[in-house]
Amino acid sequence: MPIPPKSRVKSDMQKVFVLDAQGGYAGEFVVQEDCVVEFGEFLAALPPEGLEDRKSIFLGEYRATALHGDRMSLVAITKGPVQPEEIAWGKAAFTATEAHFGGAAGTPPAAGPDKAILENLAGALEKRESQLGEREKALEEKAAAAARDLEDRERARAAELQGLQARLADVEAQRDRNREEMGRIAQAPADATVAAERKQLEKDRKMLQRRALDLLDREEKIRDRELELAEEHKRLEESRRETEGLLARIEAERRPEAGYDVEAMRREVDMRVKILQEKALDLLDREEKLRKREAELQGVDARPPAAAHPEPSR
């Protein structure tokens, strides 16, 4: 067995197709389960003159390399670049294996596929058929699930559309009702009761305004009277102080002094006393009148204001 080449960049083996001496499919050896290249795809890409030994063709991202022997052939499906030393090593290993299991190198190829190859081919076909059946079943289940999902989405969308249409119809109906109501309000005749109440309210408002003006006028008059009373009280106080001063002077003059005429002094005092008595009586009379005016003003202030016109019931 030759030693494998020491290459820095190696190809990645995916699958190996086994062909009989006539180039028919005899089986396959799967290295990577995710390899999607099938033998039919290889045959479809194969040139009419076939594929020579150690030559390669591309199948998309994959590379198919042929290794021909005396009794069978191998087609290696790889990924990545295939180095010449790898192909040479594979050819040598394949030749040595064929010589070991197939007898002498000069043995002529069989006229047709033997029983073992047919059995291998049948087993490979059954395995491939089983795999295809599983894949078909998985695809059918996936398609059924996708169809159910699509139906659910369609039903949900139809329900949503129906709900939106119902909401739109409700909005349109509400808008029509609002328009009708606004039209009725705009065309409704004036209510006689409302007009009468408005007229009565206007009348009451004017009466209250007159009443307020009257109260303001009375308040102004009362304020003037209070000022007059204050002035009168001030004058009375001045008169009282003046009277007290005169009385003090009279008392001082009543005291006899040497060299004065007592009779003349008495007559003068009596005359002044009469004057003061008359002035005191006048002050008492004026004070009585002032008390009466104060009583009248207090009666006016204590009098309750007239009741306003009651607001008409609505």
Image (cartoon, rainbow, N blue to C red):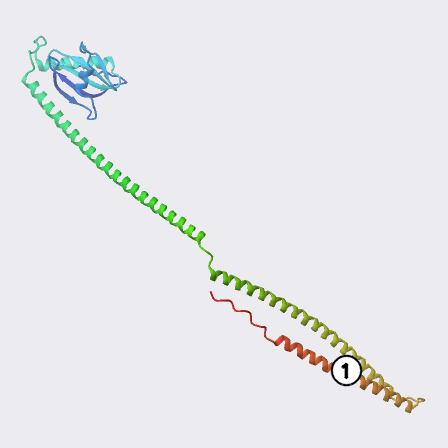
Q: Residue at x 55, y 62 (%)?
A: 202
Side of 20 where 7 appears, left or right: right
Give the quadrant of residue 256. Answer: bottom right
Outermost residue on the bottom side: it is 263
Q: Residue at x 19, y 16 (%)?
A: 44
10 Å neighbourhood of mark 1: few (<14), some, or many (≥20)?
some
Q: Residue at x 34, y 44 (%)?
A: 168
Q: Residue at x 33, y 45 (%)?
A: 169
Location of residue 211 in the rendering, given as x and y in whole percent from the top left corner:
60, 68
Side of 179 where 72 appears, left or right: left
User: Could you say which is closer to the camera, residue 311 or residue 62?
Assistant: 311
Location of residue 210 in the rendering, given as x and y in whole percent from the top left corner:
61, 66
Side of 46 where 157 appears, left or right: right
Is residue 129 in view? yes
Outermost residue on the left side: it is 115
Q: Quadrant of the N terminus?
A: top left
Side of 304 where 141 appears, left or right: left
Mark 1 residue type: Leu
Location of residue 248 in the rendering, given as x and y in whole percent from the top left corner:
82, 84
User: Could you say which is closer to the camera, residue 37 or residue 186?
Assistant: 186
Residue designated by label 1: 283
Find numbered disc 1 in the image and state the secondary structure of the residue it sits on.
helix
Give the quadrant of residue 141. Answer: top left
User: Could you say which is closer to the camera, residue 40 or residue 225?
Assistant: 225
Location of residue 97 in the rendering, given as x and y in whole percent from the top left corner:
13, 15
User: Could you say which is closer to the camera, residue 83 or residue 21?
Assistant: 21
Q: Is residue 258 above or below residue 157?
A: below
Give the quadrant of residue 291. Answer: bottom right
